[in-house]
Image (cartoon, rainbow, N blue to C red):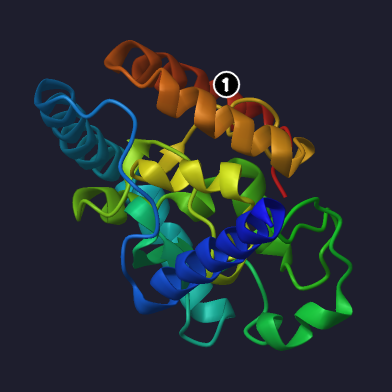
Amino acid sequence: MAKKKTRGIGRQNISLYRLNLSAGRAAVEPAGNLSLGYRFAKRLIDIVGATVLLVLLAPVMLAILIVLTITTGGKPLFFQRRAGYLGKPFTMVKFRTMRPDAEQLKQTVKNEASGPVFKNRHDPRVTRLGRWLRKTSLDETPQLFNVLLGQMSLVGPRPLVISETAELQPWQRRRLAVKPGLTCLWQVSGRSEVSFSDWARMDIWYIRRQNLLVDCKLLLLTPYSVLSARGAY
């Protein structure tokens, strides 16, 4: 009898989790470093860091915007709903790297990734310019505006789309307990070459050890990771 009851509770929890996700409500409890001092310092670093990066990258971002506007028929930016802090949705922005009809062609592309995420090293939907943008991580730079808006942080687990987040295993959902970020341990450890289970473990490792020193170390490692282009596709 006890086993049947446990299985029923498990199914109920899964349903409640997905219901909260679809309704835009908090799907998990907050975790990580919840001290006011850390949260204030982290937000200050986010604002200052994102502002400085936007100023430095402005000429490059403007050039990319102009080229993409011409080559994509006036649709240089890609907006997508992602699961943010506690699973609450937000609209993430990127430079467009795929064909406009990419979503309709998704079923024709083989998923080479493990877990709920979708990855293909030679995805035919990615444009020639898009491959270069992904390799250099310049496609992610518009997310600095998400950081300024407080929807993301410079450091934190990478946000997944809502449908992928709904498929997370119970232990993997803990990655939603902190604000998503531009870079993380997964980002500097091989990105798409890492299995999703290891990716989730890295995020949980970060949540357990979240502090300014860890954040700074990950920020310092990110430029090398970007330049190496390892796992960027």
In the displayed structure image, the side of residue 189 where residue 56 appears, left or right: left
212 to 62, vertically: above or below = above
The amino acid beneath tag 1 is Tyr
Residue 87, horizontal then vertical, whole percent: 40, 59
> Residue drawn 65% across and 36% down?
199
Q: Tag count in the figure?
A: 1
> Residue drawn 60% across and 58% down?
10
- 129 or 101, which is in the foreground? 101
Residue 201, horizontal then vertical, whole percent: 62, 31
Q: Quadrant of residue 83?
A: bottom left
Q: Quadrant of residue 202?
A: top right
What residue is pinned by disc 1? 224
- 212 or 59, which is in the foreground? 212
Residue 140, horizontal then vertical, whole percent: 48, 51
- 212 or 65, which is in the foreground? 212
Q: Under tag 1, what secondary structure? A: helix
138 to 11, vertically: above or below = above
Disc 1: CA contacts within 10 A as few (<14), some (14-19) or many (>=20): few
In the displayed structure image, the side of residue 196 where residue 160 appears, left or right: left
